[in-house]
Image: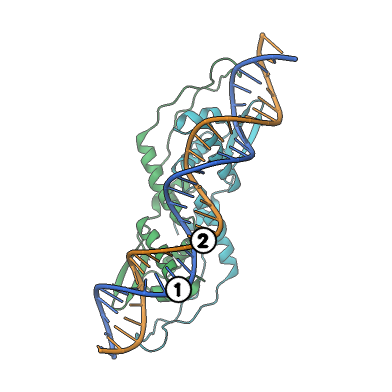
Chain colours: A green, B cyan, C blue, D orange
DNA sequence: CGTATCCATTGACAACAATCGAATCAATCG
DNA sequence: CGATTGATTCGATTGTTGTCAATGGATACG
């Protein structure tokens, strides 16, 4: 779960040559980083982070209309945040009758958590 | 490590009253969320995430001039990203002569990792 | 001293994000 | 039909990013 970049040798001379030559960059890591950064970005807003928190505690039990009064934002703004979370693959929703119930998608945070992880 | 929001009772009547009344919001959680969101936000860019990755593997061993060729960005952009990471409290740097060596601050990712964590 | 090297900072710019109000719309229930 | 939930859209505003080129400060070499 690491990116494993090659780093140049530590023997260097201040003036002289241009210091370091370019290093080959693993493709896999770049995509992995892009995925994780996308998730992190979606969590990079206090409201969205709290939304995820509530949804983890109350998976499938809270409808959007209950989420709304928890924050001082308009309904359209809340919907907007939920969409961002959906687009990042972090949450998904299920309609039951009139209501929409959101839940955190299993494993959605796994990769990032693992990378951040105990390590 | 959870936000512990109160959620309204699940017994609801579709038409009738306005669905849900506002719920008290814990102050502590809001600050905690703000801190974690700040860290997540800083990691919400592929380049910064990879920077942190490299620095974790090579703490105090890579200077900025070695970081630069790993990405296709200008020197000033790299400096800008490093500053963001510094401002988020994720990394810190130490100058040695001409070079600046960056490292991930111990425990900087702990809170977020714990929250995301195996839970 | 002069000059090259590393890196931070500044200023500029375009692109994006967060928010709102208001409106609209589809689906659903009574 | 009429009310409700919630998604979407629109327009507007305001603030934040990512990026670069250029400049500047510190340090080291000769």
Residue on which the image places disc 1: A68
Q: Is residue B22 left or right of residue D1?
A: right
Seen in the picture, residue B60 relative to B111 is either above or below; the reply is above
Q: Where in the figure is residue B48, as x and y percent of width and height?
A: 49, 42
Residue under the point 41% across and 52% down: A39
Q: Is residue A33 left or right of residue B98?
A: left
Residue under the point 46% across and 76% down: B7
Q: Are marks 1 and 2 in contact (CB under 8 Å)?
A: no
Q: Which mark is residue A32?
A: none
Residue under the point 48% across and 82% down: B21
Chain letter for mark 2: A
Residue under the point 49% across and 73% down: A70
B24 and A111: which one is in front? B24
Badge 1: few (under 14), some or many (20 or more) residues near its Cα, within 10 Å? many
Q: Where in the figure is residue B11, as x and y percent of width and height?
A: 39, 85
The quarter of the rendered structure image containing the C terminus of chain B is bottom left
Label 1 to label 2, Cα distance in Å?
15 Å
Q: Secondary structure at mark 1?
A: helix
Q: Is residue A16 left or right of residue C23?
A: right
Seen in the picture, residue C13 relative to B73 is either above or below; the reply is below
Mark 1 vs mark 2: tell me if same chain: yes
A25 and D23: which one is in front? D23
Residue on which the image places disc 2: A46
Q: Secondary structure at mark 2?
A: helix
Seen in the picture, residue B66 relative to A81 is either above or below; the reply is above
Can residue B117 be seen from the camera position used here?
no
Can residue A1 be seen from the camera position used here?
yes
Chain letter for mark 1: A
């Amino acid at each position: 779960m690491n990116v494993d970049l090659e780093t140049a040798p530590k023997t260097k001379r201040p003036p002289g040559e241009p210091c370091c030559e370019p290093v080959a960059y693993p493709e896999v890591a770049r995509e992995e980083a892009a995925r994780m950064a996308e998730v992190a970005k979606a969590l990079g807003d206090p409201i969205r982070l709290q939304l995820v928190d509530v949804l983890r505690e109350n998976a499938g039990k809270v409808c959007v209309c209950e989420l709304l009064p928890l924050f001082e934002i308009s309904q359209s703004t809340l919907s907007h945040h939920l969409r961002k979370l959906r687009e990042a693959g972090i949450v998904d929703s299920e309609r039951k009758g009139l209501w929409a119930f959101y839940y955190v998608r299993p494993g959605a945070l796994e990769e990032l958590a693992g990378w951040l992880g105990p390590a």
